[in-house]
Image (cartoon, coloured by chain):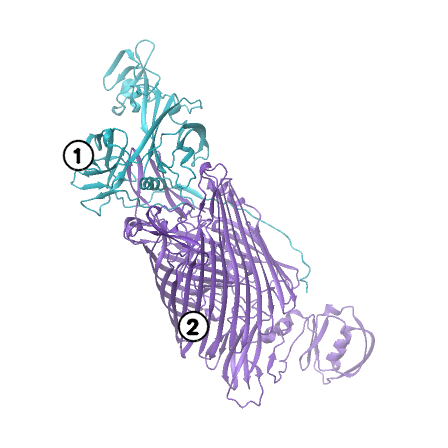
Amino acid sequence: MRKLIILLFAFFIVNFAFAQKNTLYSCNFNQIYFSDLIDSIQKETNFSIYYKSNWFDSLKVDVNYKNNTPLFIINDVLKNTSYMAFEYTSNQIVILKDDKLISEIPKYFKTNEVDENPQIANRYLSSRKAAINRTIIVGNKKSSQKYAVLRIKVLNAKNDEALAGAVIRFVETEKAISTGFNGQVSSKLKIGKHNIEISYLGMYTVSLTIDLRSAGSHTVYMFTKNIELKAIEVYGDKQMMVERKDPGIEKVTIKTMKEIPMMMGEIDLMKITTALPGIVNVGEGSAGINVRGGNYDQNAFYLNKIPIYNSTHLFGFFSAINSEIINDFTIYKGFIPVKYGGRLSSVIDVKSKTANMKKFSMKGGISPVSANLLLETPIIKDKLSLFVSGRSTYSDWILKRIEDTDISNSQANFYDFSTSAKYNSKNSHVELFAYHSSDNFDFSDISKYQYQNSGISFNLNHQINHDLKTEFLLVQSEYSFETFDRTFKEESYNHSFNINQSDLKLNFIQNINSNHKLVYGYNFSFYNLNRGLVEPAAYSNLLRIDLGNDKGMENSLFISDEFEVINNLKIIGGFRFSLFNPLGEKTVYKYTENRPKFKEFIADSILFSNNQIIKWYFNPLLRFSANYKLNNSGSFKLSFNQNMQSIFMLNSTIAVSPNSQWKLADYHLKPSKSNSFSLGYFRNLSAIGLEFSIEGFYKTTSEFTEFRDGADFLSNPNVESLVLQGKQQAYGLEFMVKRSFRDLTGWLAYTYSRSFVKVNGGTYYNRINGGKRYPSNYDIPHSVNTVLNYKLNKRVSFSSSIIFQSGRPITYPVSVYYVNDAAFVEFSERNEYRIPNYFRMDLSMTIEGNLKRDKLIHSSWVFNVYNVTSRDNPYSVFHRSSKGKISTYQYSVISVPVFTISWIFKLGNYASE
Amino acid sequence: MLQNRVKYILLIVLMLVIQSCIKDYVPEVDDEVGKYVISGKVTNNAGYHYVEVSKSSSLESFEQITVSGCQGKMIDNQGNEFVLQEEESGKYRTFISDQYLAEGKAFKIFIELPDGTEVESEFDTILSGPEIGEVKYEIDSVEITTGGYKIPGIRFFIDLNANENHPKYYKYDLVETWEYRVLFPIEWMYDGVLHHTWPPDSTKMVCWKTENVKEIFVLSTENLNTNTYNDFPLHFVSNQTERLEHKYSLLIKQQAITRKTHFYWQQMYENNNNEGGLYNSQPFIIEGNLKNLSNPDDKIIGYFYAANESVKRIFVSSSIPMNNLGCSTRFLRFGLLDIGIQEYPAYLMSNNNGGYANVVLGLRCVNCLQQGGTNIKPSFWP
């Protein structure tokens, strides 16, 4: 309130009159100037009236009132204008234009359903300081029970969107609960008064006193922190509170994403994740991330539950998802909740925003690479809304400048599109979401690559009763690519690949009592994977090779219990039972025992008919996490996870290439399984605004799939001839210090992490690296990331990101030998050496447009410098031996600073969503 | 309140230089030098069959370190032994006559190295092989990666005409021979003492040089419809050397090989032709078929294989413009005193008066033997 008063005094020219005794006023004037009327009122009564003098310069009025209150008179005079007068204190009146002044708390009634009126004018109420807690009466006074269930629903006041994961803290008991996907949570409480605080990432915290009289509910509207929002707010919702945070979970807000300097001004959420501890990427132009020493294909990437098999555009340089549509971005890299399965290392869960339920809005951005636009509109206000977003490149000029002749003589185009319709009713939410992305490269007519991701998801959330909610999901997704290769006339070919995945998920969340929360459900996935035909092009002598079809289904049942054992100890115990069946139609070869699984050793074959089950792979998986709170600011966390994976990427190159095929587990290839263990300590040092965490992990994987030396995945339908299965081992220590809610925010993350592979199938043909353990391609022992943001003022902010990584492992030439007068190089053991360390510093500056409230468009400029120090970071080191001469070279993708300017716009003002 | 009036502006500002780059880099590695390297081959053709023994050298200063003094033999699958004789340092040969070289015969080698280490290869079988196909060439140009410009030259191609009874794996070994000439006969030579040859010796003005082409050519028809291949690209000869200046000859040895041998040479090819781009496959350790019987942990590099070999020779008299390498000379300001010992023997230009001029003739001017060729015309040369 105090702020408001200051504000009012600042904006209004004060008309002041000495206090007089009367509170009622009579008058009769014809064509009197409005200002004269006010003067008269102030003289005759003890009221002071405040307004901006130039508003009514020429207004003349006729007035005739007897013993009316000044407030009534002024409002009567102004009734057909946009002005309105409000009583501020008992003897002060304020005239406002287009706005309302609320000077006291509205009265609440004793009903079962108490809804707060979420009108904009009320924002001052809900963002008040907690000192004067509003008391909300819930239920009937007459109830004689000792306990009652209180249901709280938390909504975003802007668009009525349910806020999942908002934390409701009971001040007296120090207990906290969080809302579910529909923004609701119930708790059984003692009859009486309870002080609660409701908080959510990026929203003003709401403090309330609930006077609980019998079972009932209350809806809380939360307001976005428009002005005080700080740059980095990784923590904030329940999952991210230091004392609550599950081990190994990371969240990044869209706000954070936008402020980290990015290459070519394109926000890439996968790149951003690599600034977090435990996540690395082996270099520019490489798609995919490596989480805690795991392979690229061990991460599940979901966009609104649609699995995305290739999340990048343009060889991994850019993200395939328009950052404007992202609402929530969570990575589970340690403890993976029981409802997720199917990948060994991590789950990346991206949730799109819900379209604005209140009003039309538009946003967009232009960077040197692409332009994007997002439109949101309500169809039925507060019930049904729609968004459409699109992004496209408008030039392939970047490629022209890349000095790799393969790339510079090429064309590249991409676009992505998404749309969502959401319907809200009292207890249900229905969302239909569709996504499509497409990439097209033409390498100077020698080879062409095209790939597409498409998906559609239908999501129904329903609150069955106070304690039970359900989520039903139907998802269909497809990833496909085509390759045209004309490098050698005789061997030119076309190849197309596609994978279809259909998912059905039924999840239940049930609160048994305030100590137990059950999550259980059933998942079904059906995969139809066509490795495709290698089709000879015209004049080609190539054999038509059918790489074959894979079909498979995965059925999973799961249950977990979140259990508050004692006040400070929360454990989650979960069990997931997963059954994977590769399905026919397929001819499976059996090989001579103790021989490599090569064509020449085929001993027998078995034909499986269509949809006949080829194998049964049973996988009972345990998930466990314990969180012990030491005091208010520190906690220990421990987790144990078992995961399985029945789909692999077939890739033998350093970077994930745009034509990397996927493969299901089959008769020969077993699903991979992993056990991972992590232990962490988290502490809030709130006095200096720091959060600190340290977490160690150890992970072993069996049946890890690795390609044979020189494997060619286009030549052979029998993948068992091209890959071997071995063991993977990873361990590490992650350290992070973070500063939030200040002008200078950011984090420092350091990770020590190792990752090794061992493939020893006995005979020479079944070994990699002679059967000895070797570092994986992404074994990056040391990784340091700092992200700093400084907000100079509301309009100008600076941001920097610094990354240091140990060089990735590489197989170097170690000696030279001669055969038939020609020199050849001998290579070291696999990944015995490392390329030089990687270091990069990026800077960005954001200048926001003016802060005027009434404007059509707000825009901002983002200036970005990538690789400020122009360090020549080697991507790979290789040699050429040509005509008996050997030279070694290093290859850098980007060796100069890259300067970009992007322009971002939206409808409305600075604070518009 | 204002939100429904939609108007947006497109505004793009972009400026930057972005580039990837390739530059020289010397990795720091612990040289794993001094490993034994053994390579050898037996073909279906009667005659000498060779085995070479050497040691690996460091990456920075590499050289061929031959190993002499080995004892060894080729052994066929019927127990016949053919003892290897050292022909020159590190190069061993044995004569095998027709009767032992039928298709279906398998061979291996056994070598005892000078330090007593015993090495044995696996058996490899001589398969049937087709007649060598037609060899063609065409004028082509190749981009030099470092400079970005293209240089002209000729590229050879070969056809494979095998049938279903032949193996699907082939290796091509190429031997090139070319004629080159120098401008001057030998007349004046100085090696501390001045020598005068009269009449001038013109026998060393035309020479021939023979070299193995140091590239690997392997072909597999495993994924082809038929056991044939048209225009399999072979070797490229540029105009930057004297090779194409007069007459050039290429001997193509088509070797029908086993799948395993092909696998080995294919790996050798991949490992030694890595362009280092984003999507190149990673190099790896290649395991040959040689076993160290004395110390199984000490790796022996190399491979011994059997091949059904069919050869063809073609001649090329090219008409492409040559990059003129020319003959360079050096003027002696202080006469013979200017000639250093390292230049001996130095050939001097003659003057028109029957004496010598104070001009030293460069490598390409005189005595073609200096460039490593021979002035004895090869028997196959037309």
Where is mark 1, residue-wise? B69
- Dot 2: what SS? strand
Residue B260 in view: yes
Dot in front, 1 or 2: 2
Query: Residue furthest toward the left?
Result: B116
Tell me where residue B113 appears, x and y as whole percent: 18, 38
- Say which chain is purple: A
**Residue under the image location 48 percent in, 71 percent down:** A238
Image quarter of the C terminus of chain A = bottom right
How many numbered callouts? 2
- Say which chain is cyan: B
Whether A582 is drawn above or below A637: the answer is above
Residue A277 in view: no
**Residue under the image location 55 percent in, 89 percent down:** A143
Whether A816 is drawn above or below A779: the answer is above
Disc 2 is attached to a residue of which chain? A
Say yes or no: labels 1 and 2 on the same chain.
no
Tell me where residue B7 appears, x and y as whole percent: 67, 56
Q: How crowded is mark 1: few (under 14 residues within 10 Å), some or many (20 or more)?
A: some
